[in-house]
Amino acid sequence: MTQKTVLLDIGDVLVDWDLKALVDSSLPKDMDAAQQEEMLELLWELNKKWDKGSFADGIAQAKIDYPEHAKIFDAYDANWMDHGLGAVIDGTVELMKRLKAEGHRLIAASNFAADTFERGHNAGRMDFVDLFD
């Protein structure tokens, strides 16, 4: 059998990722629907930037740029693991293990920020990353 290289994404392929649940868990309960939608959009845009570098640095900068939302950014950071990063997608991880056992080379492409990637892995929430070449 010829060895093949298999490229896998991580978020929503190997582990669930739910930005809306994370944002919902981070917003004050008394925030109206329009404000919630505005924060969802802001956090979506910021999260895309944070994925290009450091999540922690991004949170710190957001608190400077939007000081009125500092408590929301702190909650977003604190809730990231429990509300954003979801369960491992067992079927995909099992496929990954079979491919590895067959001798295929496994590589990842992901837009996780380096520090959130490490947080998830160090917490034992993404042990499958050890299978990547």
Image (cartoon, helix red, strand yellow):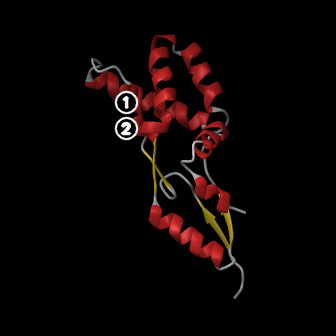
Callout 2: 10 Å neighbours few (<14), some, many (20+)? Answer: some
Residue at horizontal 62 percent and vertical 43 percent from the top: 122
Numbered circle sitting on residue 25: 1
Residue at horizontal 69 percent and vertical 88 percent from the top: 1
Residue 99 to residue 111: above or below: below
Question: Label 2 vs label 1: CA separation?
Answer: 6 Å
Q: Amino acid at mark 1?
A: Ser
Q: Decide if residue 43 is on the left or right side of residue 119.
A: left
Q: Amino acid at mark 2?
A: Ala
Task: Point out residue 85 in the picture as x, y percentages from the top left corner.
Answer: 48, 43
Give the residue number, with chain letter if any, for mark 2: 21
Q: Which quadrant: the C terminus?
A: bottom right
Q: Decide if residue 82 is on the left or right side of residue 114.
A: left
Callout 1: 10 Å neighbours few (<14), some, many (20+)? Answer: some
As rendered, which of 98 and 14 lies closer to the eye? Answer: 98
Is the residue under label 1 in contact with that under label 2 (CB below 8 Å)?
A: yes
Residue at horizontal 46 percent and vertical 16 percent from the top: 71
SS at mark 2 in the image? helix
Task: Point out residue 94 in the picture as x, y percentages from the top left corner.
Answer: 51, 69
Task: Point out residue 23 in the picture as x, y percentages from the top left corner.
Answer: 40, 31
Residue 114 to residue 30: above or below: below
Question: Furthest-top residue in view?
Answer: 68
SS at mark 1 in the image? helix
Numbered circle sitting on residue 80: none
Question: Furthest-front residue in view?
Answer: 124
As rendered, which of 20 and 127 lies closer to the eye? Answer: 127
